[in-house]
Image (tube, helix red, strand yellow):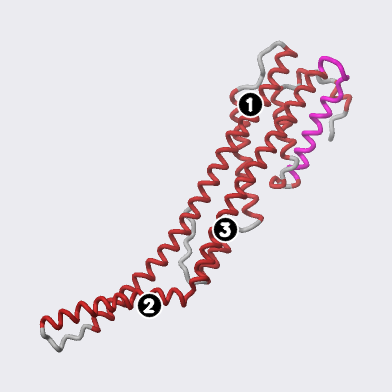
Amino acid sequence: METSQAEIRELSATDIGPGEAIMAGFSMVAADNDALGPTVRVAARKAADEFTSSVEVFPLGSRDRQYLDELLMAAVSFAAGLTRRQQERAARINTAEDEREFNFKRIVQTQRTTGVLKGGVQLLVLGGFAYAIVNAMFSLKALESGAPGLDPRYASIATALASALIGSFFKAWWTGRRVDQIHEKYRDALREAKCIYAVEATQEYEFAAQEANLAWQKFTGKAPPMTDAFRVLVVGLLSSEEQTRRGAAARESPAPSARARGSLRDLGEPAREPAP
């Protein structure tokens, strides 16, 4: 049931404090956050509208209205700043995801370009080189020792096969190492985006809280009613908002690297899963 104007008029301006302005700013942001679901968005929109209605019910030009308009401006400023910080965070995350996808495509393209034929030629050249070297070494030893029964081809062939096997293992290890580096760089970018958002969002809260507290002090001449516990609550809400957004994004679509890892498996490379 919505609050009527008669019920709102029974409230005094001091019943609406800086804390209500901060929570109204949160409600304005939550009302447009698709990750929260329709029920939460509707409730947030209702809370924001009721706060605005409680401000507009006081007469224009009155001291009460001037104080409440300052609270409303603090709420709008907080909502606008938080929305801007969210957009900047989303841009950082999108840049990190695009870079990761591009790096995966480079690995896949490299594997497709080299292919089995080129990789086999490389291993054949390596094995042939090892075969020629070992064959020459054993042939010289056989000539020096004068043992005609010693056939150096067996040792040469074994060395060539061992060289080819070692080369194939090294190639697979190097591909896996490149994949791990891409994952690590992506995780670092996500951590950096999260840390930057937490700092900047907290700054937006501090700025809005300062505006609301100044309005309260001018109107009442008393100390602001917001406590350190309220600040801890707001910072906790900012952190939980980040987890909610990331969880919703993960449910909507698979990670971009899943397609790249599948492509690597199709090429026969040992694509590695990222560490949890």
204 vs 114, left or right, is right
Q: Distance between the residues labelled 3 and 2?
A: 31 Å
Q: Position of residue 28 (x, y in %)?
A: 75, 36
Q: Distance between the residues labelled 2 and 1?
A: 66 Å
Vertical comparison of 163 with 230: above or below: below
Kindly identify which numbered label has been placed on residue 135. Answer: none
Q: Where is residue 207 in the image (x, y as percent from the top left)?
A: 66, 26
Q: Where is residue 198 in the image (x, y as percent from the top left)?
A: 58, 36
Q: Which secondary structure class fits the magenta region best? A: helix
| Pointer 2 with pointer 1, Cβ within 8 A | no
Q: In which quarter of the image is residue 70?
A: top right
Q: What element carries label 1?
A: helix
- Would you name the residue on which mark 3 appears? 102
Q: Choose mark 2 or mark 1, whichever is in front.
A: 2
Looking at the picture, which amino acid does disc 1 mark? Glu
Residue lying farthest bottom? 149
Judging depth in this view, the residue of 130 and 49 nearest the camera is 130
Looking at the picture, which amino acid does disc 2 mark? Leu
Q: Is mark 3 on a helix, strand or loop?
A: helix
Q: How far apart are marks 1 and 3 (CA)?
A: 38 Å
Residue at image position (46%, 75%) is: 118
- Would you name the residue on which mark 1 appears? 206
Looking at the picture, which amino acid does disc 3 mark? Phe
Residue at image position (57%, 58%) is: 102
Residue at image position (63%, 26%) is: 206
Q: Choose mark 3 or mark 2, whichever is in front.
A: 2
- Would you name the residue on which mark 2 appears? 124
First along the sequence among labels 3 and 2: 3
Q: Is mark 2 on a helix, strand or loop?
A: helix
Q: What stretch is highlighted in magenta?
A: 39-64
